[in-house]
Amino acid sequence: MSRSYHSIQIDKKKCVGCVICMKACPTKAIRILNEKAKIIEALCVDCGECYRVCPYGAVIPLTTSYADLKKYKYKVALPTPSLYTQFGWEVRPNQILLALKKIGFDYVYDEAWMCEMVSAAIEEYIRENSTPKPKISTVCPAVVRLITFLYPNLVNHIIPINVPREIAAKFLRNKLSKELNLKQDEIGIIHITSCPAKMVSINNPIGLSHSQLDGAISVKDIYSKILKALKNLDEEIIVHQSSGVGLGWAISGGEINGINIDNCLPVSGVSDVIEILDDIEAGKLNEIEYLECLICPAGCVGGPQNIVNRHFAKQKAENLIRMYGNKTRISRKMVKGYYKDGFFMLDEKVKPHSLPPLDNDPVKAIKKRQEIEKILKMLGGKECGACGAPDCKTLAKDIVQNKADINDCVFLKNPGS
Amino acid sequence: MDDKELFKKNFFVKGSDFANAGEVSIEIKNILKEIGYNSEVVRRVAIAAYEAEMNMVMYGGDGEINFTVNSSQVKIDLEDHGIGIADINLAMQKGYSTATEEMREMGFGAGMGLPNIKKNSDDFKIFSEVGKGTRLKIIIMNK
């Protein structure tokens, strides 16, 4: 996997070089150089925290634009279950799917239905494979990246089950190209997403030889079109088929709700995710079977490209779960059959992509690490970010790697005093 | 350790400070990642250091963790001034624990701490005196 593609860019015209995004970045991937934020691509996991906090609109997520759809003869929409939570209490999933059809998609697929199947497939996998514990969900691309970069020895915990959006896209491309006599590349399968990280998983997939999706349009970019289309719908057609089990994938706890196994744990929000991954590395949580791990607070409803407040969205998701019932209508026998055929599996093993050490020569790396401790004592410890690094420790690390200078510190203590 | 380049750091651990417990072992782990230690070794250190740090928080009163690393091995020496261990052989048995009700409620006290440290170290020594405290010497090789 190359790390060359990222879903987030800085608009240098809008960026004023403040420290807000740099401070918010959980992997310390941002520096301020010449009064502009710069993302260190090798460290970025595409979580979207910088986009969330930037007050100047200078962090630009690179999702697919609506205009890009034109190049496909046949357009398919695959909406995240969290899209259903973005409208008023009375708006039903079926209406939203029909609205997507009305605004130009030839076909809409209720991804939440595939989510139900995947929950069942995960259950099959856990029943067959007792170790390692806990297994970790693949559904959040930012979490998978965080693990491969910063927790490389946990990659074997990542469950080799593919994500619903990819499985659905593969299934639909085959089905529709046969039924409609279309070439596979004439079909554009577009995920409607609440976060830019999905773009990275499309352009730089992990565990897949290539993505089956052709792009991802953000909820934000398509919202007003859907709102308009919701008026005067022909509601005779039923496209929505998922129960509360699939709809629940929009929120933290939704994925494991469909897994009928004890000791599954949902975690959401970037700081909690990091804390739990540290716990697993320390050998804790080995009684947990499965970890549903989502980088956004409250789950995908908290995605940075959603519209409504995540608490409202979560409540809407819970209402939908009650309304459509907590019992799946998928056939377990059918899932078992597909599971045996490998339908749900990733193409390849997830590989670690550890960050480079301070130096490739371990003796030199140790020396540099000692140097960091010495430099830290000289820095002010104010953690202000004025030097262009997010905190004193990161500045010290940059200094020993010749990426920054000690005089960048505005609070530098006089070493002689 | 005869290797010229040594990294040393001392940490102070406060007894019964459950809110911050585990932070030293995270820092030790992260230092090894920065140095570029083999990830399986990092994991063994993370587990051993965590268990040892937790023992110190639970039983050790206050204590000190002495962390030394060169390119071939990690040494973690822990010394606390806690209650001490009356019967080390018993304490080394899997499942044996003197954890209080309160500790068990927090999910500790499965009696796996010391056996787990031993399992993950290449060399492990323990000295203890009741009423005075406990010392652990852990060595893990960078293989």
Image (cartoon, helix red, strand yellow):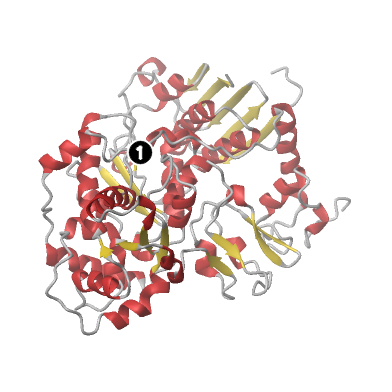
Q: Position of residue A56 (x, y in %)?
A: 59, 76
Q: Foreground residue, A21 or B109?
A: A21
Q: Looking at this view, name the residue that lies furthest to the right.
A: A416
Q: Residues within 10 Å of mark 1 (few under 14, many from 20)?
A: many
- In the rendered structure, which amino acid carries the disc numbered 1? Leu
Q: Residue at x 60, y 29 (%)?
A: B37
What residue did someone put label 1 on?
Answer: A346
Q: Is A115 situated above or below B59?
A: below
- In percent of width and height, residue A68 lies at 45, 66
Q: Is residue A368 above or below residue A301?
A: above
> Label 1 marks which chain's residue?
A
* Element type at mark 1: loop
Residue A246 visible somewhere in the drawing? yes
User: Which is more toward the observer, A179 or A150?
Assistant: A179
Farthest residue toward the front?
Answer: A181
Say left or right for A92 vs A4: left
User: Which one is nearer the viewer's eye here, B92 or B32?
Assistant: B32
Which percent across, then down, holds residue A326?
Answer: 13, 57
Give coordinates of residue B111: x percent, y percent: 33, 27
